[in-house]
């Protein structure tokens, strides 16, 4: 088994997958604690559905542009090459960021509560995305394409060096923002009213949390798929909270759990040919149950 693993890691695309997977796991664990404590963890699920709709729109746009540029002239070839090189993240990222802002603003509306706003936007995006994929299908296997996007696929194992660099830059941005505004995020997470009274712009930092969450969602789509992203954000935080009580200790433990489970899930999926996203989520679930047992033992002791 070790020889098989070393053989696979001799290929660059496997190393790319591990690097991106660990970066995504680290980023998702940082804000998971704040989202869970603010009882807004379901935002990950809502934004993941929005990202699915944006990905469907990006695919349809790409197919339409390629059809319009079909021809043998130099301009048509240049447009086709540009579309092939352009990552769908160019469309997915701004759409998901706008959705995060709308979720925050709509959730503050007294007529539409936060959970209702998330359900409304997420279900609408999911329905529109599935309709676009069916009406403007890019391949004959529509069901397979949708299933791969929702539950993750081998796309994490087909990353190019450019996509790795994009993921790394976005991950550094997310980690940097979290470290710079750590104290403000801590204040807004635990007592938003007190933070606002002490001069902290709570709405601005809530918006910052939503925007960073949107970045994490876009990064994680290739890893675990649209429907499993929430598990990557929530499970490590919940596991750490079973044992630790301080905010800093929970964040550090959550980051370690998330990175270890991502690495274990990726390695297991390579060795046993299982879906990458599902394997990582199962690893997170197993660690959660282990930490629940540890918590019970500590309480009895």
Image: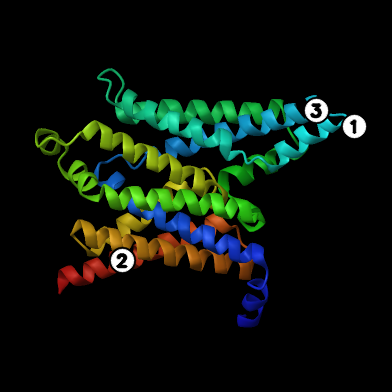
Task: Look at discs 1 and 2 and give the one toward the viewer.
Answer: 1
SS at badge 1:
loop
Q: Give the class, few, some or many, for how many residues have Cα within 10 Å of label 1's Cα (few <14, many ≥20).
A: few
Residue 243 x/y as whole percent: 23, 65
Q: Give the class, few, some or many, for how many residues have Cα within 10 Å of label 2's Cα (few <14, many ≥20).
A: some
Residue found at x 50% / y 54%? 168
Quarter of the image containing the C terminus?
A: bottom left
Q: Residue furthest top?
A: 111
Q: Residue furthest front?
A: 74
Residue of label 2:
291
Q: Residue furthest right?
A: 72
Residue 11 x/y as whole percent: 68, 69
Ranked by sequence position, the earlier of labels 1 and 2 is 1
Nearer to the camera, 268 or 51: 51
Give how far apart the Cα atoms at labels 2 and 3 are.
55 Å
SS at badge 2:
helix
Give how far apart the Cα atoms at labels 1 and 2 are.
61 Å
Residue of label 3:
69
Left or right: 166, with 286 as reference point? right
SS at badge 3:
loop
Tell me, yes or no, whether the two marked residues, 3 and 1, touch with CB atoms within 8 Å. Answer: no
Picture quarter containing residue 102? Answer: top left
Residue found at x 53% / y 58%? 20
Residue found at x 60% / y 43%? 149
Give how far apart the Cα atoms at labels 3 and 1 are.
9 Å
Residue of label 1:
72
């Amino acid at each position: 088994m070790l020889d098989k693993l070393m053989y696979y890691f001799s290929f660059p695309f496997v190393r790319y997958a591990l690097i991106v997977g660990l970066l995504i796991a680290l980023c998702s664990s940082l804000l998971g604690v704040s989202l869970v404590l603010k009882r807004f963890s379901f935002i990950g699920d809502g934004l993941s559905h929005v990202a699915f709709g944006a990905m469907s729109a990006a695919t349809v746009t790409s197919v339409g542009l390629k059809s319009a540029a079909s021809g043998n002239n130099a301009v048509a070839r240049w447009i086709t090459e540009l579309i092939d090189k352009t990552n769908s993240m160019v469309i997915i990222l701004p759409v998901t960021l706008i959705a995060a802002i709308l979720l925050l603003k709509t959730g503050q509306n007294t007529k539409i509560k936060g959970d209702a706003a998330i359900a409304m936007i997420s279900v609408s995006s999911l329905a529109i995305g599935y309709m676009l994929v069916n009406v403007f299908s890019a391949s004959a296997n529509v069901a397979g394409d949708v299933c791969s996007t929702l539950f993750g696929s081998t796309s994490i194992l087909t990353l190019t060096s450019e996509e790795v660099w994009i993921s790394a830059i976005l991950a550094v941005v997310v980690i940097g923002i979290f470290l710079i505004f750590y104290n403000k995020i801590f204040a807004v997470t635990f007592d938003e009213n007190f933070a606002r009274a002490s001069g902290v712009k709570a709405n601005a930092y809530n918006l910052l949390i939503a925007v960073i969450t949107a970045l994490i969602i876009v990064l994680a789509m290739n890893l675990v798929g649209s429907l499993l992203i929430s598990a990557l954000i929530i499970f490590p935080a919940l596991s750490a909270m079973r044992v630790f009580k301080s905010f800093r200790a929970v964040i550090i433990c959550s980051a370690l759990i998330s990175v270890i489970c991502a690495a274990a899930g990726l390695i297991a999926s390579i060795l046993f040919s299982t879906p990458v996203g599902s394997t990582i989520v199962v690893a997170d679930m197993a660690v959660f149950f282990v930490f629940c047992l540890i918590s019970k033992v500590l309480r009895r002791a």
